[in-house]
Amino acid sequence: MKESQCKARIFAILARKSSFAVIFRRGPSNSVLLIGWDTSNDSFQTGQWLKGRIYERRCDLSPDGKLLIYFAAKHPTPMYSWSAISRPPFLAALALWRKADGWGGGGHFLSQHRIALNHRPDEMKIADGFSIPKWLRVEPFGQNPGWGEDDPIWSARLQRDGWILVSSPTATKNDFGKKVLWEPSPAITWRKQNPKWPKKHALDMSIVGIGEKNGPWYMTEHCVVRNGKDLDRLGRSDWADWDHSGDLLFAMDGCVYRVRCKQGVLDPLEDAKEIADFSHMKFERREAPPAGLRWK
């Protein structure tokens, strides 16, 4: 793993029932690129950029990975913020719902044919010029839709995908205007067992701070728990998850890495293989192809 001063940050979502994943490559802060990733062979497809902000923790992939629901904002524009469904790795909207603020937004794929949209009742009307197919049902998210920020969407998706909350703060440190806005004690930690060898390996994701000055909003550390007790610390990193194969996937400094797990033996973290470097990409205006503008 190489050290870098790169400002690019990576966040990914893995489809539940396929080898497809999407990568949100952010940097500079007002530009984000959507990238398609086939985790079965680590091939990548560059999609579309957005000059604006995508709230990746409020996004979700359909179980087969062929549709994406995302929440985005672009200031100032007449629309301000919106939730949309697209065909990844493209952002061109197949369906769009307008919002006027940063509360709520985004949603979950409850199944291949059901979406829970995190909008208030008066924001559930689809925008003019858009429609949804008869096979897709859209319903409100949860008991109080349209509120919250990354939560409740993010925490609900983590739980759905096998993460368990194992540590919550009993105290916090607030330093408004300082280096870190908010620090929990202990860290907020989620744990996910390896899908192939759950008794051998687990992955911890710890949020150690929020709002780092000149840094990420979420200060995140990852750690592998081997054999239920031995800690193998990855340290500060943007994102990590288990591949369906049992390999460890993670991202830092604009690069994506894979750590092989063969017959239940996970390679040392220092042997991680870099499979992609997105650190030096720059905004390019791209149009979605015809296939990216159709539901099927």
Image: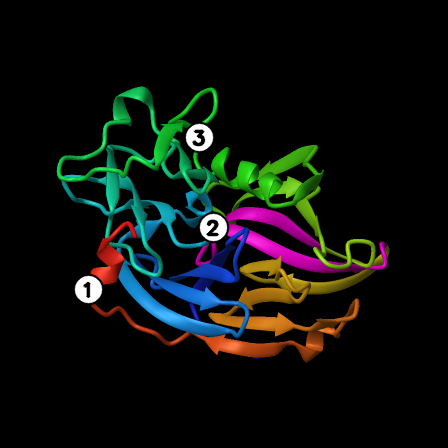
Mark 2 and mark 3 lie on one chain; the one further toward the N terminus is: 3
Q: Which mark is residue 287?
A: 1
Magenta segment includes 286: no
Up/down of 220 relative to 150, above or below: below
Judging by the rendered image, the residue that carries numbered circle 3 is 148
Mark 1 and mark 2 lie on one chain; the one further toward the N terminus is: 2
Residue bounds of the magenta highlight: 203-228
Question: The disc labelled 3 sits on which kind of residue?
Answer: Gly
Up/down of 209 relative to 238, above or below: above
Q: Are marks 2 and 3 in contact (CB under 8 Å)?
A: no
Pinpoint residue 226: horizontal percent, then vertical percent.
81, 61
Q: Which of 86 and 290 is in front in this view?
A: 290
Give the class, few, some or many, for how many residues have Cα within 10 Å of label 2's Cα (few <14, many ≥20).
few
Quadrant in the picture for residue 269: bottom right
Secondary structure found at label 2: loop
Q: Which of 115 and 54 is in front in this view?
A: 115
Main SS class of the magenta portion in the image: strand
Give the class, few, some or many, for how many residues have Cα within 10 Å of label 3's Cα (few <14, many ≥20).
some
- The residue located at (47%, 25%) in the rendering is 142
Whole-angstrom CA distance, mark 1 to mark 2, is 30 Å
Q: Which mark is residue 217?
A: 2
Whole-angstrom CA distance, mark 2 to mark 3, is 16 Å
Q: Are marks 1 and 3 in contact (CB under 8 Å)?
A: no
Q: Residue 177 carries which label?
A: none
Between label 1 and label 2, give the one nearer the viewer: 1
